[in-house]
Amino acid sequence: MSITNAKLNLIVEQLEPEVFPLSEYLTTHPEIGGEEKESSAYIAHFLEKYGYTVEMDYCGLSYAFRAYKPSDKPRIALMCEYDALPEIGHACGHSLSCGISVLSALAISKCFPELPYEIDLIGTPGEENIGGKVTLAENGGFDRYQYAIMGHIFSSNVPQWRILACNDLYITITGKGTHASATPWEGHSALNAAQLFMHGIDLMRVQYKPFMQMHGIIEEGGVTPNVIPDRVVLNYYPRAASMEDLETLVENTLRLLKGVTYGTNTKYTAMQRFDTYAELHYGKTAVHTLMDIFKDLGMEAEEVPYPSGASDAGNVDLVIPAFHLGIKGSDSFVDIHTVEFEKLMYGERAKQTLRDGAKVIANFLYQTATQPELMEQIILDWKKYRKKE
């Protein structure tokens, strides 16, 4: 017996020609994060034609929006991304991803106007740089919702991405410069301290918990070989499987840094310049439901075996359950953030991606909204993970 709704799937097919021009506009008019003025305005105008009230600069974030229909019903959030990358445009796939969210919402609204939940669309700018979802989550932008969901375009179908918690450490080590040949004993090398620190990080890796990671570079390492460097700048990204593990990793790293600089008679400052990104919970109930939907639609899907990378979607998951699906957008593997991937945003293959993604998400929305026990279990899974019981 089919678990997806045939009428809903048909309406997705019927509405796709109306929604694809929205994705096509975003693809051909790319705007990078923090500059999505025309993109957000275009989406807002499009949604207003379908009866949505659109609140711009939602939660005080420029070019964010909330599109909703007034109602006392409980609500589910469909997230929309629409920022592009410098020079290579929508090689991130956000133009199609946004269209999938919009098409899902329109199909549900048309097929089931009496659904016991309202489906809102939340525009989340700056995923590639400022992490707009972090600001929206911190400012209460998702507090009213049961859960949030979106699809991202990749080369495979995935029911939920496993991502890592992540932040940054911007480290400046200062010492005392002097001539490296004439009076080296007068100096305190910031570069030596940096070398010891980096070697210490490498030695500590053998005691890291699974999926703890430290990626780093030397941004400034001295001026000339015959002068002992008095200043070195390191840029590191710590990652871990959870926020708790990330905190432990950063604490251990700063302890090492303190010891190294003490031993080399240098000083340091360490600052975090960007928001901390949280991990996504991997709720088995939701994942199994989505895998069943993919299978019923004849779409091959796979679970991701281990976490990698980071996304601001994890910060939504700190507030409510958040689902970040992978939607297959190519017939063979094409690496994301490439010119080749941007080409997949055009033509018949892009239209197929739009239909496929919307069918999966719309059917998940329908199942959770019409099966109270399913919704309850999904939220319970999340509460257990986030220790909110």
Image: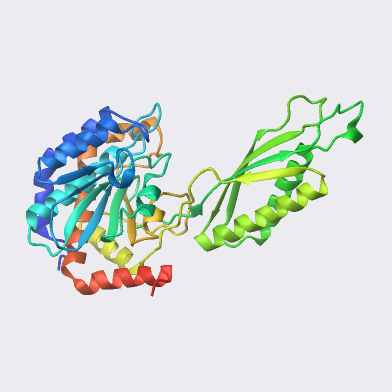
Residue 242 appears in view? no
Quadrant of res 143: bottom left
**In terms of depth relative to the viewer, which is nearer, 267 or 313?**
267
When the figure is inspected, residue 60 is found, relative to residue 74, above or below; the finding is above
Residue 341, horizontal then vertical, whole percent: 35, 35
Residue 335, horizontal then vertical, whole percent: 41, 39
Task: Determine the residue positioned at 15% across, 38% down.
Answer: 46
**In terms of depth relative to the viewer, which is nearer, 68 or 294?**
68
Q: Is residue 224 left or right of residue 303?
A: right
When the figure is inspected, residue 157 is found, relative to residue 91, above or below; the finding is below
Image quadrant in which the C terminus is located: bottom left
- Furthest toward the front, the residue is 60
**In terms of depth relative to the viewer, which is nearer, 71 or 333?**
71
Q: Is residue 100 left or right of residue 167?
A: left
Image quadrant in which the N terminus is located: bottom left
Task: Determine the residue positioned at 26% across, 60% down.
Answer: 145
Q: Is residue 64 left or right of residue 217?
A: left
Applied colour scheme: rainbow
Residue 330, horizontal then vertical, whole percent: 31, 41
Residue 100 appears in view? yes
When the figure is inspected, residue 22 is found, relative to residue 106, above or below; the finding is above
Quadrant of res 204: bottom right
Residue 383, horizontal then vertical, whole percent: 37, 70
Task: Determine the residue positioned at 15% across, 68% down.
Answer: 370
